[in-house]
Structure formats: C-alpha cells, structure tokens
Image (cartoon, rainbow, N blue to C red):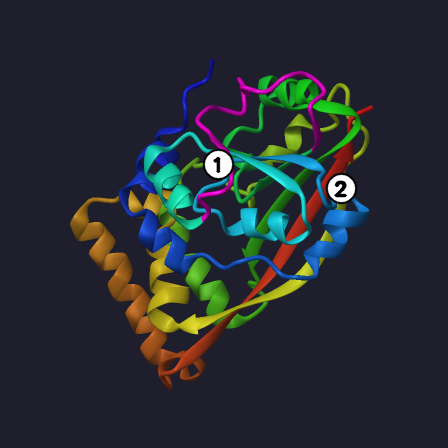
Amino acid sequence: MPRLHPEAATGFSRDPQRYERGRPDYPAALDDWLCADLGLGPGRPVLELGAGTGKFTQRLLSCGADVTALEPLTAMHRQLRAALPHVPILTGRAEAIPLPDDSQDAVVAAQAFHWFATPQALAEIRRVLRPGGRLGLVWNYRDDRVPWVATLTEIMKPYAGDCPSFASRRWQEVFPAPGFGPLHEVRVPHRHRGPVAQVILDRVLSVSYIANLPTTERAAVKARLERLIADTPALAAGGAVVVPYITFAYSCRRT
C-alpha cells in the first residue's frame, strides 16, 4: 500500500490547532450541491476521507447525513474527536477503507483528494459505494484574481516543489476512472473573514510544505507575509479582513 506522503504526514501533524484556526470553512451554498449532486439528506450514510479537524464534516452534518470520518493522522484525529465527539472516526487510509462493500451512499473528500489520487484509492472508494452512489471532491482555493492574493500565492510557490496540490491539477489524471461516470464541476464564491493573524498568517503557515520548513526559513516566510500585510491597505487597517476564495466541488457517480 502507498505510504502517506511525507509532507502531509509531518506537516499536518505539527500544529493541528493552527490548521483549525487558519483554514476557511465551507460555504452554506454547498448544501444544495450535497443534496442535489450527491443525494445526501437525513440518515444517508456518507464517508468523509481525510476529515482533518472536521471543517467539512460539519457541513455534512448540517444536511442530516449519517457521517463516518476517516483520518489517518493521530494529531488530526485527536482534534476531530475533541470537536465532534459524536461522529464515528476510523483510523485508516483511502487505499484500504475499513468498511463493507456497497455500504455508503456517498464518499467525499474536502481539501484532501490530491494526497491520494490513485487508481488504488478510487477502486476502494468504488467498492464501498453502493451502485449509483456518488463521489464528491471539494476544495477551497484562493481567488488569485485579487492582486494581493496573487502575491500571497507567489510567496508560497518557491517552497511547493512537487508536493501534491489542487492547483497542479495532477489529481485529475486519474479520471475518467473505471466504474465511475464523468466528473461534473460546480464553483461557488466564498469568503474567509477573520483576524489577519488567523486568515493569512495561520493559513499560510499551516500549509504542509511551509510547516515542514526549518525554523529560520519558516520565519522568513512569516516576515514576507507581514511585509505584504503592512504594504496592503486592505490588510493593514486592523480588525477583520476578508480573503476571497472560490470553492470547487466535483461529483461523479458509481456506474
């Protein structure tokens, strides 16, 4: 079985509290997508892969679904358990899901699928989905059409290397996938509002390949972020700031 990518295994385990503070939630507008495209509703069984600290888990719960979370990292598992003690949490991997065949109406992954976009994982997802069940993939991605947001991305880019990401689109190479219909895309505008230390500093410093940097390099990234904040009137004024995002949601049906 493939090992967890080392960037994810160490980067996301260093400071799950910073991850929780810095990451945006998901727009309420996705509730319509969860119902219409994934067929979720009260009592419908759904497996969330790579549930992390539970940010998308709460969106699933809001539509009444019967949620089971799977999270391979111990530090994230603890954070999720503390936040949502009533949600069943499995320790495992997308490539070996500890659930029976044909047991789920939907399988979803939010901000995670690029880490395990493999034929082996898709075969496991297909196994646990009932015939006609849906796979849902979701990402929040910064809206780089805003100039200072584009600068934020440029600060991060030199450290990314070949780390899996949504932006690389390499995750799409596993589609079309055996046993699944075509992939359908929906885009929803989103905003992350909060203190600048949270929505910019914690957000960037919680990125796996930034969190894994040596202390001096991580401090240099933080200093560049602080200069960007000081030089950008929309950010330097104090109080709450807004980071614009686009939420990308993809669905396909088990054939």
The stretch drawn in magenta includes residue 95: yes
Count neighbours of disc 2 (C-alpha within 10 A) and say few if under 14, some if 14 to 19, many if 20 or more.
many
Asked if residue 155 shows in the view, the reply is no
Report which quarter residue 227 is drawn in.
bottom left
Q: How many marks?
A: 2
Q: In the image, what residue occupies the spot 65% across and 24% down?
A: 125
Which marked residue is nearer to the observer: mark 1 or mark 2? 2
Residue 217, compared with residue 234, is above or below; it is above
Asked if residue 144 shows in the view, the reply is yes
Q: In the image, what residue occupies the spot 41% across and 84% down?
A: 233
Residue 148, compared with residue 60, is above or below; it is below
The stretch drawn in magenta includes residue 21: no
Query: Looking at the picture, how far across and down is residue 126, in whole percent?
Result: 70, 21
Instruction: Name the image quarter holding the C terminus.
Output: top right
The span shown in magenta is 84-105
Residue that badge 1 annotates: 164
Count neighbours of disc 1 (C-alpha within 10 A) and say few if under 14, some if 14 to 19, many if 20 or more.
many
Q: In the image, what residue occupies the spot 25% across and 44% down?
A: 213
Q: In the image, what residue occupies the spot 68% across and 39% down?
A: 136
Q: Amino acid under label 2?
A: Leu
Residue that badge 2 annotates: 38
Query: Looking at the picture, how far across and down is residue 41, in whole percent?
Result: 74, 46
Residue 185, compared with residue 201, is above or below; it is above
Q: Amino acid under label 1?
A: Pro
Query: Looking at the picture, how far across and down is residue 169, in whole percent?
Result: 60, 40
Q: Secondary structure at mark 1?
A: loop
> What's the CA distance linking mark 1 and mark 2?
25 Å
Q: Nearer the viewer, residue 10 or 149?
A: 10
Q: Earlier in the sequence, mark 1 or mark 2?
A: 2
Query: Looking at the picture, how far across and down is residue 2, in whole percent?
Result: 46, 17
What kind of secondary structure does the magenta stretch mostly adopt?
loop
The residue lying furthest to the top in this view is 1
